[in-house]
Image: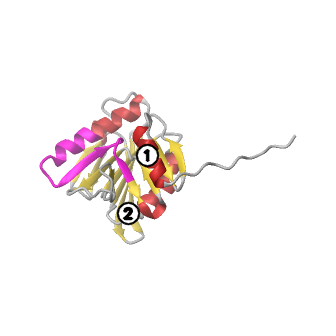
Amino acid sequence: MTIISLPTKTYTPDEYLTLEVESETRNEYRNGEIALMPGGTPDHNQIAVALNGLLWFALRGKAYSVFIADQRLWIPERNIYTYPDAMIVPKPVELQPGRKDTVTNPILIVEVLSDSTKAYDRDEKFAAYRTIATFQEYLLIDQYQPHLEQYVKQRANQWLFTEYNGLEAKVSLATVGVEIALADLYENVEP
């Protein structure tokens, strides 16, 4: 028996955007391929909601916008469209030319890790994010235990890594001068 491998269909960015606007699901675009973004667990969503609330209150009246998972990000150097779990973008928000729904200038990006995405979020996705000129800080939040990884850009090609463990830990966001207690992030998460 012969197994025939069919070529994977590739899409242009315009084809993807046309499909995505009509889609009932969120899909990531990776240089011609479209990948369904997995749904989150209740704990994943509780952490994302807590983070959004904490950031929104801390940054009220300041020159930043806070976006959550439904906001699309364009990474032109890697030809990727994605939906980070959270982003902080300085005002005015810069949009992809010709689009009203795709940001291009985040300074801080957050991903809540799951078993299925943590390797991609730490490796390929972080490498893609680092090509964004405005990007300065990356947070990876574990949804299974009180653990947070922070990467802060020091200069070109140099990032400072800090790790936080336990509910008593607090992280200071370098880009916006906000402190977040892990106890607040994990308040509604079941142990």
Front in this rendered view, residue 137 or 21: 21
Of callouts 1 and 2, the N-terminal one:
1
Which residue is at a point 33% across and 59% down the rendered structure image?
A: 97
* Quadrant in the rendering for residue 40: top left
Front in this rendered view, residue 65 or 93: 93
Q: Is residue 9 above or below residue 158?
A: above
Q: Position of residue 14 (x, y in %)?
A: 45, 53
Amino acid type of the residue that numbered disc 1 sits on in the rendered structure: Thr
Q: Position of residue 134 (x, y in %)?
A: 31, 63
- Which residue bears the numbered disc 2? 132
| Label 1 Cα crowd, 10 Å radius (few <14 / some 14-19 / many 20+) | few
Mark 1 and mark 2: Cα distance apart in space = 24 Å
- Which residue bears the numbered disc 1? 18
Q: Secondary structure at mark 1?
A: helix
> Which residues lie in the magenta part?
52-73
Q: Position of residue 78 (x, y in %)?
A: 48, 61
Front in this rendered view, residue 160 or 25: 25
